[in-house]
Amino acid sequence: MTARLLIVGPQGSGKGTQGVRIAEAYGIPTVSTGDIFRANIKNETELGKKVKAITDAGDLVPDEVTSEIVRDRLDEPDATEGFLLDGYPRNAVQVGHLDEFLAGREEALEAVILLDVPREESIARITQRAAEQGRSDDTEEAIAKRLEIYERETAPIVDTYAERGIVDRINGVGTLDEITARIFAALDARGFTR
């Protein structure tokens, strides 16, 4: 069975950590726009320089650029039987881009994992991550701005996917293993096999 999945939640909800566990369990690649952007920043590519200026200001990379990067990644051979999207789509425009791309391959997203985490918990986790990893994009102002953008633009896409009956709302507070177990239980109930 294929596993074409999306993990969504506010910054600091644990998407990256849980995404790695899900991808390993189902043998699919994680397609994280954040990871792709950070790799380009680290390697000081033209895209990386542009993205760094945008993210350091707390802004988000334009939809067209992000969609193009994701389409290219999903065209790679390891993503033909499934993938886990993390950080994309983040708004209604990107949902349209993704739907159009997948429809062209006669595919569709099969499940959306929503990590439900209170705002205070997200901020505490991001602040800790910034201290541990020295991430320049995790300033207090940038965190607040990204959470506001998430609440305004990304949270509404959950309603779009809920209308399709593919959203599993997961309590994102607890130990890593507890949260992973909740995710696997929801995916098991949908018939995904590990």
Image (cartoon, grey):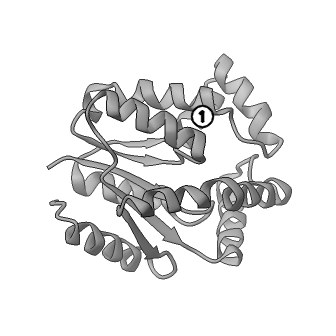
Q: Would residue 25 appear left or right of 48 to someone viewing this image?
A: left
Q: Quadrant of residue 100?
A: top left
At a point 80% along the width and 53% down the height, the residue shown is 142
- Tell me: residue 44, above or below residue 84: above
**Is residue 52 shown to the viewer in this render?**
yes
At a point 72% along the width and 65% down the height, the residue shown is 127
Q: Secondary structure at mark 1?
A: helix
**Is residue 18 shown to the viewer in this render?**
no
- Tell me: residue 95, above or below residue 150: above
Which residue, as the protein is rendered here, is positioned at the far top?
Answer: 46
| Few, some or many residues within 10 Å of mark 1 (<14, 14–19, 20+) | many
| Front residue (pair 181, 69) | 69
Q: Position of residue 170 (x, y in %)?
A: 43, 74
At a point 35% along the width and 63% down the height, the residue shown is 165
Q: Would residue 129 appear left or right of 59 to someone viewing this image?
A: left
Q: Would residue 102 appear left or right of 132 to someone viewing this image?
A: left
Q: Position of residue 78 (x, y in %)?
A: 26, 32
Q: Would residue 47 appear left or right of 52 to someone viewing this image?
A: left
The three-letter amino acid code for the residue at tag 1 is Phe
| Front residue (pair 19, 63) | 63
Q: Quadrant of residue 34?
A: top right
Q: Which residue is mark 1?
A: 37
Q: Position of residue 98 (x, y in %)?
A: 45, 37
At a point 68% along the width and 63% down the height, the residue shown is 126
Q: Position of residue 134 (x, y in %)?
A: 71, 51
